Image: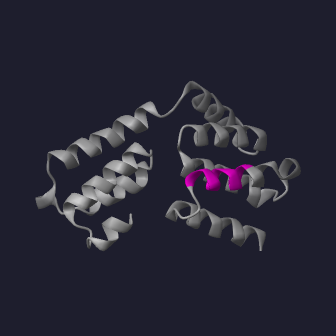
Amino acid sequence: RGAWEESNKALDITLAYAGALVEANRLDEAEGLLNEIRMVDRDALHEQLMAQIELKREAGKSPEIEALEAELANDESDHAARVKLAVQLTMSAHHRDALEHLLVVLRVDRDWNNGEAKRLYLDTIASIGKGDPLAAEYQRKLFSILY
């Protein structure tokens, strides 16, 4: 990210950074970067990265995730199912979705299941890396709930 910012968002660095984000399953961020590229500058690599994002989104839902999503659709207040879904999403590198599900639980009950939701939330942030912008964003969201 630092090289991208220092390059004044040069096209080749933007594409390389977006590719790294795709590899890390940070699909929303990669798509956001790619969408900022002017139409005239969009080339075959841009098209390839956009296609990879779509394919990863389609393939990213395991049967376990789909089953838990269906269970949650039947009862949105089922915190146990929501936390299990968050764990599965984290294991599939869908960190933002996992953190959002854990936030839902924490907003209702900050000490759900003896602090399990908070522990999993912090573990997910730690697995992303505390210097990462996504981690920083969700640390702020947690602090706003706790304090």
Magenta portion: prevailing SS class: helix
Above or below 23: residue 41: below
Residue at 85%, 56% (x, y): give it.
111
**Magenta span of residues:** 120-128
Q: Position of residue 90 (x, y in %)?
A: 60, 43
Q: Is residue 95 magenta?
A: no
Residue at 61%, 63% (x, y): give it.
138
Q: Position of residue 126 (x, y in %)?
A: 63, 55
Residue at 61%, 47% (x, y): give it.
98
**Residue extending farthest right:** 114
Quarter occupied by the C terminus: bottom right
Q: Position of residue 141 (x, y in %)?
A: 64, 67
**Residue extending farthest top:** 63
**Residue extending farthest left:** 40
Q: Position of residue 53 (x, y in %)?
A: 35, 42
Side of 6 where 144 appears, left or right:
right
Q: Report how many numbered discs are placed on residues in the image.
A: 0
Of 15 and 60, which appears nearest the observer?
Answer: 15
Residue at 57%, 61% (x, y): give it.
135
Quarter occupied by the N terminus: bottom left
